[in-house]
Amino acid sequence: MKLINAMPALLAVFLCAACEDMFVSRAPPVYQRPLPAPYPTQQPEVVRATPIAPHEIDIAGSCKRTEEDGFREDATVRVSHNAVQTLTWKLWVSRRGWCHFDLAEFKQVQQTPHIELHAIDGSGCTLMVWQDPRRITLAHARCEKHCTPGIYDEAWPVLFDPRSGGCAQIR
């Protein structure tokens, strides 16, 4: 008699045990990559810019162009065996201002791995010329005094095609 009275309770226990599989989530395990150690044992690798390969730069270049947005450049440079013989460069930042550089205002201080010229007025302005396989670049650094106030951050380098001496394609 006790067994018959306990039957409904035992039946309920068995049913609950059988139903447990239906209600318990059996999602596949999620694999996550391990978290990095809080204190790495090695310092991260520092990525440094590739140094400029030394090139014998010889160019008689002239680049005059106007971009669609109004930026213009007019640059003439003559370099023979990494010695700058002629350099005049004027660039316009839309209609807001310009920068101007002339060789008479600079002294060449370096020939390799890139050409470097320093302003003789002590302003710290530096002009640099280097060559990669696609172009010869004439760039400036710290030359705010050679530009209209407020436009220097938008004054880009001029790029020459090493084969033709004209403006290099920028796209």
Image (cartoon, grey):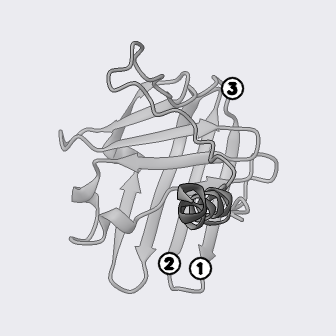
Q: Which residue is mark 3?
A: 56
**Circles 3 and 1: CB distance less than 8 Å?**
no
Under circle 3, the secondary element is loop
Separation of residues labelled 1 and 2 (CA atoms): 6 Å
Neighbor class of circle 2 (other Cα within 10 Å; few <14, some 14-19, many 20+) is some
Under circle 2, the secondary element is loop
In the rendered structure, which amino acid carries the disc numbered 3? Glu
Q: Residue at x 53, y 36 (%)?
A: 84
> x%, y% of residue 162?
75, 46
Residue 78's quadrant in the figure? top right
Q: Which residue is mark 2?
A: 71
User: What numbered label is drawn on residue 152?
Assistant: none
Pointer 1 or 2: first along the chain:
1
In the rendered structure, which amino acid carries the disc numbered 1? Thr
Front of the two marks 3 and 2: 2
Separation of residues labelled 3 and 2 (CA atoms): 30 Å
Question: Residue 113 versus residue 40: which sits nearer the camera?
Answer: 40
Pointer 3 or 2: first along the chain:
3
Neighbor class of circle 3 (other Cα within 10 Å; few <14, some 14-19, many 20+) is some
Q: Which residue is mark 1?
A: 66
Q: Residue at x 44, y 65 (%)?
A: 90
Under circle 1, the secondary element is strand
Question: Residue 31 versus residue 161: which sits nearer the camera?
Answer: 31
